[in-house]
Image: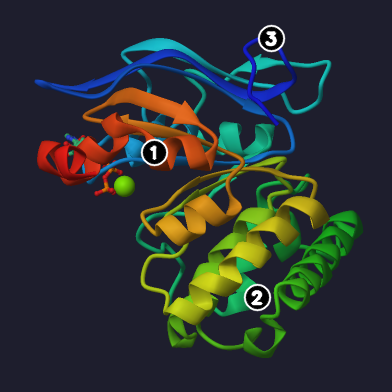
Amino acid sequence: MTPTKSGDAILSLNGVTLRFSGLVAVSGVTMSIPRGSIVGLIGPNGAGKTTAFNVITGFYKPTSGYVEFSRAPSESVRLTGLPPHKVCKAGIARTFQNIRLFNNGTAMQNVMVGAHLRQRGTWWMNMFSYAFPAAAREEREIASGAYSLLERLGLEKYADSPASSLPYGAQRRLEIARALATKPSFLLLDEPAAGMNPQESAELLDFIRRLRDEFSLSILLIEHDMKVVMGVCEHIWVLDQGELIADGAPNEIKANPRVIEAYLGKEAVAHA
Ligand SMILES: Nc1ncnc2c1ncn2[C@@H]1O[C@H](COP(=O)(O)OP(=O)(O)OP(=O)(O)O)[C@@H](O)[C@H]1O
Ligand SMILES: [Mg+2]
């Protein structure tokens, strides 16, 4: 699958720049992500990858440029300027580089937080559920939906355990479950393999593919683990100091001298 500007893109960045006072963290980035694909964003530390995620998800407003999202082929919205909860409602969910779970909450409660974002009623209606039977029904549906998500991700045995007590790999999956509870069509994963042991990161490849297929998602992942990136991504963009320096299929990226130089320095290219 090749990304095209005019093709069926689920998300596009158009000349996106983000400055932090003196520093240009993301510089004129244009990319277009095909619907249904699993694609990667890589680059050395400080390249601007997480910042790009923060722009897409509304945590930062770009200094210039805009982000467009097309949940269904016939519709398209500009996300730029929308706050994070509205971007999430539009159909984009994310996980964080440093896991952000409610540590004292159970696994169930963490997933239900995601689902509440889609709720029609409000929290106070649940408190007076005798007067708002529809809200009570909705709350029961949310709980059963959350439990079935835990089951689908193999986390049901942790349903009543505090999030902080889960093994590390399971916490990463729980964060993904919470993201899925918002019913996204586009999922952003910021370093999903970070801190995983080799077996967990090998399993992650199949897991990410299964997510895409079973939840009809398009997925963009940031990842330093090259086995994961090269193993699962159909297309890869490379950022260095805020600028896109390459994009292509995994094999093209592996052999690209600019990419090797960005990661390993000029000498590595000379010896390659
Ligand atoms: N809130 C902020 N204020 C000022 N500078 C920031 C802020 N967030 C990020 N930066 C800077 O922007 C640049 C890009 O950071 P970013 O976190 O996007 O990099 P990254 O590619 O995700 O790196 P890593 O692989 O280490 O996670 C860095 O120089 C960083 O110090
Ligand atoms: Mg980062």
Residue 91: horizontal and vertical position, in percent?
A: 68, 37
For badge 1, the amino acid type reads Ala
One can see residue 113 in this view: no
Marks counted in the figure total 3
Residue 125, compared with residue 242, is above or below; it is: below
State which mark lies toward you, 3 or 2. Answer: 3
Which amino acid is tagged 3?
Ser
Residue that label 2 marks: 108
Quadrant containing ligand 1 reads top left
- Asked whether mark 3 and ligand 1 are closer than 8 Å, the reply comes as no
Instruction: Report helix, strand or loop for mark 3.
Output: loop
Disc 2 marks a residue whose amino acid type is Met
Circle 1 is placed at which residue position?
255
Name the residue located 27 percent from the left edge and 40 percent from the top edge.
260
> Is residue 249 rendered to the left or right of residue 211?
left
As measured in the structure, the alpha-carbon distance from the residue carrying label 3 to the one carrying label 1 is 27 Å
Which of these two is toward me, 217 or 133? 217
